[in-house]
Each structure stands twice: as C-alpha cells, then as structure tokens.
Image (cartoon, rainbow, N blue to C red):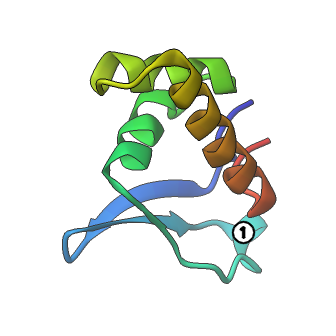
Amino acid sequence: MKIKKGFELREVCGEHIIVAYGKENIDFNKVISLNESAAYLWKNIVDKDFTADTLASLLQQEYEVDAETAKKDAQALLDEWTNVGLVC
C-alpha cells in the first residue's frame, strides 16, 4: 500500500491533521486527526510502500509493545486509513 498523493500531515495548534490538496481530492471533506503514534507511523511511511506488518514493526521499534498488539493496532489503523481513502 501507499499513501495517496495529495495528502500531507501538518501540525495545527498542537494537533496532527491530515490535509488534502489538489483537484483529485477536491471532494475530500473529512478532517483526519492523528494521535502521536499514528503521526509517527505516517512520517515513516510517506512515499514508501508498506503493509500492516511494516506498521507493526515500526510500532515495536518505537514503543514497548508486543508483536500481537502491534499487529492488531497496525491493522486497525490501516483499515481506518483505507476506509477514509488515504491509502491505495
């Protein structure tokens, strides 16, 4: 998977927000706020191919989390990003 073109992470008033730009995203009318760990993952996968396993590995590198929890959390985040159209 990859983050779709036209989305970028910005910090607004201390919050991590996904901003859509470009005419291909003109109808994107959602505000996506990321917590610290989701923002960490986003920053580490921008312009890269990734899977839920990639995200889980990154979580384990940065946080004290077991493999099963990291995989479950990574898959849930990836499912959410897919559902709102951030990744392809």
Residue at the spot x=51%, y=29% of the render? Answer: 45
| Residue nearer the viewer, 65 or 1 | 65
The reply to whether residue 34 is in sight is yes
In the picture of the structure, the residue carrying the numbered disc 1 is 25
> In the rendered image, which quarter contains the C terminus?
top right
| Residue nearer the viewer, 17 or 7 | 17
Residue at the spot x=52%, y=28% of the render? Answer: 70
Residue at the spot x=46%, y=41% of the render? Answer: 42
Residue 23 higher or lower than 76, as above or below: below
Residue at the spot x=77%, y=80% of the render? Answer: 27
What amino acid type should be assigned to the residue bearing mark 1? Asn
CA neighbours of label 1 inside 10 A, class few (<14), some (14 to 19), many (20+): some
Q: Residue furthest left?
A: 14
Q: Is residue 44 left or right of residue 77?
A: left
The reply to whether residue 49 is in sight is no
Q: Position of residue 73 (x, y in %)?
A: 57, 39
Residue 73 higher or lower than 34, as above or below: above
> In the rendered image, which quarter contains the N terminus?
top right
Secondary structure state at the residue bearing disc 1: helix
Q: Position of residue 37 (x, y in %)?
A: 36, 44
Residue 6 higher or lower than 3, as above or below: below
Q: Position of residue 10 (x, y in %)?
A: 35, 61
